[in-house]
Protein backbone atom coordinates (compact mmCIF):
# COMPACT_ATOMS: atom_id res chain seq x y z
CA UNK A 1 0.00 0.00 0.00
CA UNK A 2 2.99 2.29 0.47
CA UNK A 3 3.12 3.33 -3.19
CA UNK A 4 -0.62 3.53 -3.62
CA UNK A 5 -1.96 6.92 -4.69
CA UNK A 6 -5.39 7.39 -3.13
CA UNK A 7 -8.04 8.83 -5.42
CA UNK A 8 -10.19 11.38 -3.65
CA UNK A 9 -12.57 11.30 -6.62
CA UNK A 10 -13.34 7.64 -5.78
CA UNK A 11 -13.89 8.30 -2.09
CA UNK A 12 -10.76 6.37 -1.18
CA UNK A 13 -10.46 6.84 2.55
CA UNK A 14 -9.47 3.46 3.89
CA UNK A 15 -10.34 2.38 7.39
CA UNK A 16 -7.22 1.37 9.22
CA UNK A 17 -8.44 0.82 12.79
CA UNK A 18 -8.77 -2.94 13.29
CA UNK A 19 -11.02 -2.46 16.28
CA UNK A 20 -13.55 -0.49 14.23
CA UNK A 21 -13.36 -2.97 11.34
CA UNK A 22 -14.27 -5.76 13.75
CA UNK A 23 -17.04 -3.75 15.37
CA UNK A 24 -18.69 -3.10 12.00
CA UNK A 25 -18.86 -6.81 11.23
CA UNK A 26 -19.96 -7.66 14.77
CA UNK A 27 -22.92 -5.30 14.38
CA UNK A 28 -24.43 -7.69 11.83
CA UNK A 29 -25.98 -10.94 13.08
CA UNK A 30 -24.73 -13.05 10.18
CA UNK A 31 -26.14 -16.55 10.24
CA UNK A 32 -27.35 -19.45 8.10
CA UNK A 33 -26.08 -19.94 4.59
CA UNK A 34 -24.91 -16.37 4.23
CA UNK A 35 -23.83 -14.14 1.39
CA UNK A 36 -22.46 -10.69 2.17
CA UNK A 37 -22.12 -8.04 -0.52
CA UNK A 38 -19.43 -5.45 0.02
CA UNK A 39 -19.17 -2.31 -2.11
CA UNK A 40 -15.66 -0.90 -2.41
CA UNK A 41 -13.33 -3.38 -0.68
CA UNK A 42 -10.38 -1.02 -1.19
CA UNK A 43 -7.35 -2.82 0.20
CA UNK A 44 -9.51 -5.62 1.63
CA UNK A 45 -9.24 -4.75 5.32
CA UNK A 46 -12.99 -4.91 5.95
CA UNK A 47 -13.44 -7.77 3.47
CA UNK A 48 -11.09 -9.92 5.50
CA UNK A 49 -13.14 -9.47 8.67
CA UNK A 50 -16.35 -10.24 6.78
CA UNK A 51 -14.89 -13.35 5.15
CA UNK A 52 -14.04 -14.77 8.57
CA UNK A 53 -17.72 -14.98 9.54
CA UNK A 54 -19.68 -15.22 6.28
CA UNK A 55 -20.00 -18.24 3.99
CA UNK A 56 -19.49 -16.14 0.87
CA UNK A 57 -18.54 -12.57 0.09
CA UNK A 58 -19.20 -10.74 -3.17
CA UNK A 59 -17.34 -7.45 -3.63
CA UNK A 60 -17.59 -4.69 -6.21
CA UNK A 61 -14.52 -2.52 -6.68
CA UNK A 62 -14.27 0.14 -9.37
CA UNK A 63 -10.50 0.62 -9.14
CA UNK A 64 -8.48 -2.04 -10.98
CA UNK A 65 -5.27 -0.76 -9.41
CA UNK A 66 -6.32 -2.52 -6.22
CA UNK A 67 -6.35 -5.98 -7.77
CA UNK A 68 -2.82 -7.02 -6.74
CA UNK A 69 -3.22 -5.55 -3.27
CA UNK A 70 -6.51 -7.40 -2.79
CA UNK A 71 -4.96 -10.65 -4.08
CA UNK A 72 -2.35 -10.33 -1.41
CA UNK A 73 -4.56 -9.24 1.52
CA UNK A 74 -7.14 -11.91 0.83
CA UNK A 75 -4.88 -14.78 -0.27
CA UNK A 76 -5.93 -16.99 2.66
CA UNK A 77 -9.63 -16.89 1.77
CA UNK A 78 -11.45 -18.93 -0.84
CA UNK A 79 -14.94 -17.55 -0.17
CA UNK A 80 -14.50 -14.11 -1.75
CA UNK A 81 -15.36 -13.05 -5.30
CA UNK A 82 -14.45 -9.59 -6.51
CA UNK A 83 -16.05 -7.94 -9.52
CA UNK A 84 -13.94 -5.04 -10.75
CA UNK A 85 -16.62 -2.68 -11.99
CA UNK A 86 -18.77 0.28 -11.07
CA UNK A 87 -21.39 -1.01 -8.62
CA UNK A 88 -23.92 1.51 -9.95
CA UNK A 89 -23.72 -0.04 -13.41
CA UNK A 90 -24.17 -3.66 -12.34
CA UNK A 91 -27.26 -5.79 -12.57
CA UNK A 92 -26.99 -7.22 -9.06
CA UNK A 93 -29.78 -9.75 -9.56
CA UNK A 94 -27.87 -11.17 -12.54
CA UNK A 95 -24.60 -11.31 -10.56
CA UNK A 96 -26.33 -13.14 -7.71
CA UNK A 97 -27.50 -15.92 -10.01
CA UNK A 98 -24.08 -17.52 -9.54
CA UNK A 99 -24.56 -17.79 -5.78
CA UNK A 100 -26.63 -20.05 -3.61
CA UNK A 101 -27.56 -18.55 -0.23
CA UNK A 102 -30.36 -18.25 2.28
CA UNK A 103 -29.52 -14.97 3.98
CA UNK A 104 -28.29 -11.86 2.20
CA UNK A 105 -26.44 -8.98 3.86
CA UNK A 106 -24.61 -5.86 2.81
CA UNK A 107 -21.66 -4.42 4.68
CA UNK A 108 -19.63 -1.51 3.35
CA UNK A 109 -17.60 1.53 4.09
CA UNK A 110 -19.28 3.47 1.29
CA UNK A 111 -17.54 5.85 -1.09
CA UNK A 112 -19.10 9.08 0.14
CA UNK A 113 -19.50 10.79 -3.22
CA UNK A 114 -22.22 8.30 -4.20
CA UNK A 115 -23.80 7.26 -0.89
CA UNK A 116 -27.38 8.12 -1.83
CA UNK A 117 -27.33 6.58 -5.36
CA UNK A 118 -25.87 3.39 -3.88
CA UNK A 119 -28.54 3.18 -1.17
CA UNK A 120 -31.27 3.89 -3.72
CA UNK A 121 -29.92 1.21 -6.03
CA UNK A 122 -29.84 -1.32 -3.19
CA UNK A 123 -33.44 -0.56 -2.21
CA UNK A 124 -34.70 -0.49 -5.78
CA UNK A 125 -33.06 -3.84 -6.51
CA UNK A 126 -35.80 -5.36 -4.28
CA UNK A 127 -33.31 -7.93 -3.11
CA UNK A 128 -34.14 -9.44 0.23
CA UNK A 129 -31.38 -7.97 2.40
CA UNK A 130 -31.74 -8.92 6.06
CA UNK A 131 -29.27 -6.33 7.24
CA UNK A 132 -27.53 -3.48 5.49
CA UNK A 133 -24.76 -2.04 7.61
CA UNK A 134 -22.85 0.83 6.10
CA UNK A 135 -20.44 3.50 7.14
CA UNK A 136 -21.42 6.90 5.83
CA UNK A 137 -20.51 10.51 6.46
CA UNK A 138 -21.94 11.45 9.87
CA UNK A 139 -24.16 14.15 8.45
CA UNK A 140 -25.67 11.72 5.91
CA UNK A 141 -26.21 9.11 8.61
CA UNK A 142 -28.02 11.69 10.75
CA UNK A 143 -30.35 12.40 7.85
CA UNK A 144 -31.00 8.74 7.09
CA UNK A 145 -31.77 7.80 10.67
CA UNK A 146 -33.62 11.04 11.51
CA UNK A 147 -36.83 11.11 13.54
CA UNK A 148 -39.98 13.06 12.55
CA UNK A 149 -39.94 16.74 13.57
CA UNK A 150 -36.16 16.90 13.37
CA UNK A 151 -34.44 19.17 10.88
CA UNK A 152 -32.83 16.16 9.15
CA UNK A 153 -36.08 14.21 8.52
CA UNK A 154 -36.57 13.95 4.74
CA UNK A 155 -38.23 11.90 2.01
CA UNK A 156 -35.41 9.31 1.83
CA UNK A 157 -35.70 8.75 5.60
CA UNK A 158 -39.43 8.04 5.33
CA UNK A 159 -38.93 5.83 2.27
CA UNK A 160 -36.23 3.77 4.00
CA UNK A 161 -38.33 3.61 7.13
CA UNK A 162 -41.02 1.87 5.17
CA UNK A 163 -38.74 -1.09 4.45
CA UNK A 164 -36.33 -1.03 7.38
CA UNK A 165 -35.81 -0.21 11.00
CA UNK A 166 -32.99 2.30 11.02
CA UNK A 167 -30.35 2.02 13.69
CA UNK A 168 -27.33 4.17 14.51
CA UNK A 169 -24.52 1.82 15.45
CA UNK A 170 -21.57 4.06 16.40
CA UNK A 171 -19.61 7.12 15.36
CA UNK A 172 -16.14 6.76 13.85
CA UNK A 173 -13.60 9.53 14.12
CA UNK A 174 -11.91 10.84 10.97
CA UNK A 175 -8.62 9.82 12.58
CA UNK A 176 -9.41 6.15 11.91
CA UNK A 177 -8.91 6.58 8.15
CA UNK A 178 -6.03 6.86 5.70
CA UNK A 179 -6.00 9.44 4.22
CA UNK A 180 -7.89 11.34 6.89
CA UNK A 181 -11.20 12.77 5.57
CA UNK A 182 -12.58 16.18 6.57
CA UNK A 183 -15.55 14.76 8.43
CA UNK A 184 -16.41 12.09 11.00
CA UNK A 185 -18.41 9.03 10.00
CA UNK A 186 -21.19 6.91 11.41
CA UNK A 187 -22.07 3.26 11.00
CA UNK A 188 -25.78 2.72 10.50
CA UNK A 189 -27.86 -0.41 10.00
CA UNK A 190 -30.99 -0.86 7.93
CA UNK A 191 -32.74 -3.87 9.39
CA UNK A 192 -35.43 -5.53 7.32
CA UNK A 193 -38.97 -5.04 8.65
CA UNK A 194 -40.87 -8.27 8.65
CA UNK A 195 -44.26 -6.59 9.06
CA UNK A 196 -44.57 -3.76 6.62
CA UNK A 197 -47.70 -1.63 6.35
CA UNK A 198 -49.73 -2.63 3.27
CA UNK A 199 -49.04 -0.28 0.37
CA UNK A 200 -50.98 -0.25 -2.91
CA UNK A 201 -48.31 1.29 -5.10
CA UNK A 202 -44.69 1.77 -4.02
CA UNK A 203 -43.83 4.04 -6.94
CA UNK A 204 -46.71 6.36 -6.17
CA UNK A 205 -45.68 6.35 -2.50
CA UNK A 206 -42.17 7.43 -3.46
CA UNK A 207 -43.50 10.22 -5.67
CA UNK A 208 -45.85 11.43 -2.95
CA UNK A 209 -42.94 11.56 -0.52
CA UNK A 210 -40.79 13.51 -2.91
CA UNK A 211 -43.60 15.99 -3.59
CA UNK A 212 -44.43 16.35 0.11
CA UNK A 213 -40.86 17.34 0.92
CA UNK A 214 -40.26 19.33 -2.27
CA UNK A 215 -40.02 22.74 -0.62
CA UNK A 216 -38.92 22.22 2.95
CA UNK A 217 -40.48 25.31 4.48
CA UNK A 218 -43.77 24.96 2.68
CA UNK A 219 -46.89 23.34 4.10
CA UNK A 220 -48.50 20.15 2.87
CA UNK A 221 -51.21 22.33 1.30
CA UNK A 222 -48.61 24.07 -0.86
CA UNK A 223 -46.42 21.11 -1.69
CA UNK A 224 -49.35 18.84 -2.55
CA UNK A 225 -51.56 21.39 -4.29
CA UNK A 226 -51.92 19.15 -7.32
CA UNK A 227 -53.43 16.32 -5.29
CA UNK A 228 -56.93 15.92 -3.82
CA UNK A 229 -56.58 18.33 -0.89
CA UNK A 230 -60.02 17.55 0.61
CA UNK A 231 -59.08 13.92 0.98
CA UNK A 232 -55.61 14.80 2.30
CA UNK A 233 -57.14 17.10 4.91
CA UNK A 234 -59.52 14.39 6.10
CA UNK A 235 -56.65 11.96 6.67
CA UNK A 236 -54.39 14.54 8.30
CA UNK A 237 -57.12 15.55 10.77
CA UNK A 238 -57.55 11.92 11.76
CA UNK A 239 -53.93 11.97 12.97
CA UNK A 240 -54.21 15.45 14.53
CA UNK A 241 -52.40 17.20 11.71
CA UNK A 242 -53.76 19.74 9.22
CA UNK A 243 -53.09 21.10 5.76
CA UNK A 244 -50.78 23.66 7.32
CA UNK A 245 -48.57 20.91 8.77
CA UNK A 246 -45.18 20.32 7.18
CA UNK A 247 -43.98 17.01 5.76
CA UNK A 248 -41.20 16.81 8.34
CA UNK A 249 -43.84 16.50 11.10
CA UNK A 250 -45.63 13.47 9.62
CA UNK A 251 -44.74 9.92 10.60
CA UNK A 252 -44.54 7.01 8.19
CA UNK A 253 -48.07 5.67 8.78
CA UNK A 254 -49.63 9.00 7.72
CA UNK A 255 -47.72 8.96 4.43
CA UNK A 256 -48.75 5.35 3.83
CA UNK A 257 -52.42 6.12 4.41
CA UNK A 258 -52.20 9.20 2.20
CA UNK A 259 -50.58 7.18 -0.59
CA UNK A 260 -53.16 4.39 -0.34
CA UNK A 261 -56.11 6.80 -0.32
CA UNK A 262 -54.91 9.10 -3.08
CA UNK A 263 -54.02 6.30 -5.49
N1 LIG B 1 -13.54 -1.04 2.27
C1 LIG B 1 -12.38 -0.23 2.37
C2 LIG B 1 -12.21 0.25 3.79
O1 LIG B 1 -13.17 0.12 4.56
O2 LIG B 1 -11.16 0.73 4.12
C3 LIG B 1 -12.40 0.96 1.40
C4 LIG B 1 -13.54 1.91 1.55
S1 LIG B 1 -13.38 3.39 0.63
C5 LIG B 1 -14.31 4.52 1.64
C6 LIG B 1 -14.47 3.22 -0.75
C7 LIG B 1 -14.07 2.22 -1.81
O3 LIG B 1 -15.08 2.20 -2.82
C8 LIG B 1 -12.77 2.51 -2.54
O4 LIG B 1 -12.00 1.34 -2.60
C9 LIG B 1 -13.20 2.93 -3.96
O5 LIG B 1 -12.26 2.63 -4.95
C10 LIG B 1 -14.48 2.14 -4.11
N2 LIG B 1 -15.45 2.70 -5.08
C11 LIG B 1 -15.65 4.00 -5.36
N3 LIG B 1 -16.66 4.13 -6.25
C12 LIG B 1 -17.10 2.88 -6.54
C13 LIG B 1 -18.10 2.35 -7.41
N4 LIG B 1 -18.88 3.17 -8.16
N5 LIG B 1 -18.27 1.01 -7.47
C14 LIG B 1 -17.48 0.19 -6.71
N6 LIG B 1 -16.52 0.63 -5.88
C15 LIG B 1 -16.33 1.96 -5.77
Image (tube, grey):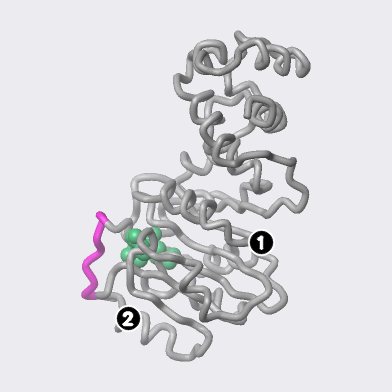
- Asked if residue 115 can be seen in this view, the reply is yes
Q: Quadrant of ligand 1?
A: bottom left
- Give the overall secondary structure of the magenta segment: loop
Q: Is residue 10 above or below residue 52?
A: above
User: Image quarter for residue 111?
Assistant: bottom left
Crowd band around label 2 with a 10 angstrom C-alpha radius: few (<14), some (14–19), many (20+): some
Range of residues picked out in magenta: 2-9
Q: Going by the image, does 59 lie left or right of 101?
A: left
User: Image quarter for residue 229?
Assistant: top right
Whole-percent x, y for residue 63 in the image: 28, 69
The quarter of the picture where the N terminus appears is bottom left
Front: mark 1 or 2: 1
Q: Secondary structure at mark 2?
A: helix
Whole-percent x, y for residue 53 in the image: 62, 78
Q: Secondary structure at mark 1?
A: strand
Whole-percent x, y for residue 88 in the image: 38, 58
* Magenta span includes 3: yes
Nearest to N terminus: mark 1 or mark 2: 2
Image mark for residue 130: 1
The quarter of the picture where the C terminus appears is top right
Image mark for residue 69: 2
* Magenta span includes 227: no
Q: Nearer the viewer, residue 186 or 103?
A: 103
Residue at position x 68%, y 74% from top? 102
What residue occupies the far front of the structure in this picture?
Answer: 263
Q: Is residue 197 above or below residue 242?
A: below
Residue at position x 70%, y 14% from top? 241
Distance from disc 1 to disc 2, alpha carbons, whole Å, reads 30 Å
Residue at position x 68%, y 28% from top? 251
Whole-percent x, y for residue 107 in the image: 54, 64
Q: Nearer the viewer, residue 86 or 127?
A: 127
Amino acid sequence: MNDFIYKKSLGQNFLTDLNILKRIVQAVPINGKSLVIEIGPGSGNLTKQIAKVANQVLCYEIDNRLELILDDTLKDFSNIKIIFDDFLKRNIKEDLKNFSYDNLYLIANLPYYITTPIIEKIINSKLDFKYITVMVQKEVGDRIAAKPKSREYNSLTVYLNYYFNLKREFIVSRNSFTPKPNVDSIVISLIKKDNRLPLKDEIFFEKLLRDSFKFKRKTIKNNLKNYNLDLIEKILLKYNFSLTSRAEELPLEVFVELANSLK
